[in-house]
Image: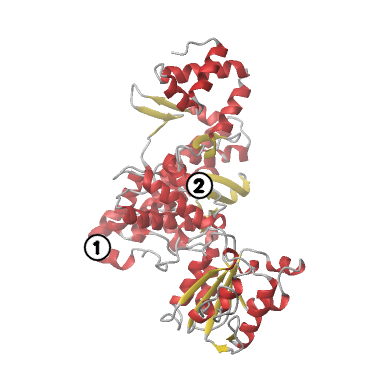
């Protein structure tokens, strides 16, 4: 990678960027995305796809010629071939990871499988058209095919078998000689076309209306296109029209209550009440009264009869969140309710027959809780009739972008702001974050960012994490030359630099005090605020270091 970077030269005086002897250009990906969108709108999907594939193919051929030149200079064959994926990364198109390569130059045999990360074309298509059923990295497929064809000396065609635009977690491509695909229609995309004549013969506008890919629909409350989300949602949908007890499993913040409410709203009980109760938020001595109600005089202070959550949910749905935290005594009574459909208020001996659908949820491993004696096995098997596991956000990265857009729209409306969305860098930062708090954490971060972003502007990385959060976004180039965005602790990064440069603590403190006083223009109080200490503390430190206090 280092040798390749040495071939990249910027000449601002002449207005040239060179990669070896090939002239290059820097373009905004948003500008390319607008061009791509206009091609789709003007030509229809099939012709735009072919044109973009052939554009990429031509670009790949040029880089393939550069790799062949390096191979002739004595570089090992596979090492020379891998210059192509490295060039694709340097040029900003996508990060390429090799899975498997078979390459025999004598017989011109080739088979390769690669993973793509941070595809600009994927990001552009999702932003403009949403998710669909077909892969969308057309220009990049063309590049990979053109590069490999030039390197091997025969037509090699790549296919994208997984794509983030289809909801997959990553893009995966496979390449082999064109004839091995046994798909003439697909291979035709890589051959030159006389598109001008076809534009005259066909009414492109009408064809576009029939052929342009529709935005994939998702529910107006549940947002998701990833395979994990779709699997959970398909289970949810299949249970909607029945009265079966559903157990929602997953980490805190994955959206269990949103799933439960969708189940209620799309079932036969939609006109009835939806009552949610967080079992972990109610003291153990009050949980039974909250769930089952009380009669007047049932205990000291019970001056009035009161219906519990079960009664209020009659002919509707009761959502029991954090069920794993229920006391054992309450678990016994809950089991009886599930078995008989009847409750008894505290202080009453008259059972009440109720028609309530139970949806339970927990982030506790109930099987481990059973083994520890904290959860009854008979209640577990009763609740576990129809379990649905909602995957954490880190396993459904394809859902992050549409969730971000949903929250941006929501909070812009709430706070009366107009924003243009996230910058490319901010979106990459969001996609790279592990989101331990899942969707709830994402929502909170976006709400803060909407408040911090300027009216009519865009959300930047600093708006996401807040200026006081200690988070920063910077570029990192690893040993393989891969450029990624890294978010880290700014203080930790500063400490690492101090230690690496062997700066002693006394010098660091003295320089920090001087810098604060210079920035505050000698104002002791202002300098103290910059340093996060009191004015007397600063005066003492200045005196100790022999520095002027004004």
- Nearer the observer, 149 or 308: 308
Relative height, residue 271 to residue 476 (above, below): below
Q: Is residue 388 visible?
A: no
Residue 464 location (% of width, % of height)? 44, 44
| First reached walking from the N terminus: tag 1 or tag 2 | 2
Residue contact between numbered discs 1 and 2, judged by CB atoms under 8 Å? no
Relative height, residue 489 to residue 355 (above, below): above
Residue 308 location (% of width, % of height)? 53, 77
Residue 53 location (% of width, % of height)? 41, 52
Q: Residue at x 35, y 60 (%)?
A: 45
Secondary structure at badge 1 equals helix
- For the residue carrying disc 1, how many other residues have a C-alpha within 10 Å: few (<14), some (14-19), or many (20+)? few
Which image quarter is the N terminus in? top right
Question: Pointer 2: what residue?
Answer: 149
Residue 205 circle label: 1
Query: In the image, 267: left or right of 345?
Result: left
- Nearer the observer, 41 or 113: 41
Secondary structure at badge 2 equals helix
């Amino acid at each position: 990678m280092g040798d390749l970077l040495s071939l990249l030269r910027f000449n601002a005086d002449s207005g040239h960027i060179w990669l070896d002897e090939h002239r290059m250009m820097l373009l905004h990906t948003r500008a390319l995305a607008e061009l791509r969108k206009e091609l789709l709108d003007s030509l229809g999907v099939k012709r735009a796809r072919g044109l973009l594939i052939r554009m990429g193919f031509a670009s790949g051929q040029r880089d393939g010629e550069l790799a062949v030149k390096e191979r002739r200079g004595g570089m090992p064959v596979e090492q020379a071939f891998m210059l192509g994926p490295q060039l694709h990364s340097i040029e900003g198109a996508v990060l390429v990871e090799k899975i498997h390569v078979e390459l025999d130059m004598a017989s011109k045999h080739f088979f390769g499988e690669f993973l793509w990360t941070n595809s600009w074309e994927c990001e552009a298509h999702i932003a403009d058209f949403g998710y669909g059923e077909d892969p969308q990295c057309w220009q990049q497929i063309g590049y990979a095919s053109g590069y490999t064809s030039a390197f091997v000396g025969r037509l090699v065609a790549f296919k994208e078998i997984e794509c983030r635009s289809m909801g997959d977690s990553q893009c995966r491509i496979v390449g082999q000689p064109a004839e091995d695909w046994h798909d003439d229609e697909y291979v035709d995309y890589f051959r030159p076309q006389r598109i001008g004549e076809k534009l005259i013969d066909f009414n492109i506008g009408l064809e576009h209306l029939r052929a342009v890919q529709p935005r994939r629909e998702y529910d107006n409350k549940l947002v998701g296109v990833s395979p994990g989300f779709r699997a959970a949602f398909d289970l949810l949908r299949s249970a909607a029209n029945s009265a079966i007890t559903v157990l929602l499993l997953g980490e805190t913040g994955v959206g269990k209550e949103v799933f439960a409410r969708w189940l209620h709203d799309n079932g036969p009980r939609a006109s009835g009440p939806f009552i949610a109760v967080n079992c972990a938020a109610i003291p153990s001595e009050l949980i039974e009264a909250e769930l089952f109600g009380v009669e007047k005089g049932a205990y000291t202070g019970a001056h009035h009869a009161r219906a519990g959550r079960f009664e209020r949910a009659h002919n509707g749905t009761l959502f029991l969140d954090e069920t794993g935290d229920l006391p054992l005594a309450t678990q016994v009574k809950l089991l009886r309710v599930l078995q008989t459909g009847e409750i008894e208020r505290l202080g009453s001996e008259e059972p009440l027959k109720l028609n309530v659908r139970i949806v339970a949820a927990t982030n506790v491993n109930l099987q481990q809780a059973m083994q520890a004696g904290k959860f009854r096995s008979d209640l577990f098997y009763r609740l576990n009739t129809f379990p649905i596991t909602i995957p954490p956000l880190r396993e459904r990265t394809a859902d992050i972008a549409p969730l971000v857009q949903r929250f941006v729209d929501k909070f812009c409306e709430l706070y009366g702001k107009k924003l243009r969305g996230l910058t490319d860098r901010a979106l990459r930062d969001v996609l790279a974050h592990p989101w331990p708090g899942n969707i709830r954490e994402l929502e909170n971060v976006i709400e803060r960012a909407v408040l911090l972003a300027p009216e009519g502007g865009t959300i930047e990385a600093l708006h996401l994490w807040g200026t006081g959060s200690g988070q920063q976004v910077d570029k990192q180039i690893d040993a393989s030359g891969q450029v990624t965005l890294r978010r880290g602790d700014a203080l930790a990064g500063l400490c690492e630099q101090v230690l690496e440069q062997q700066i002693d603590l006394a010098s660091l403190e003295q320089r920090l005090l001087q810098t604060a006083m210079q920035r505050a223009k000698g104002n002791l109080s202002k300098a103290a605020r910059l340093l996060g200490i009191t004015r007397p503390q600063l005066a003492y430190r200045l005196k100790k270091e022999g520095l002027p206090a004004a």
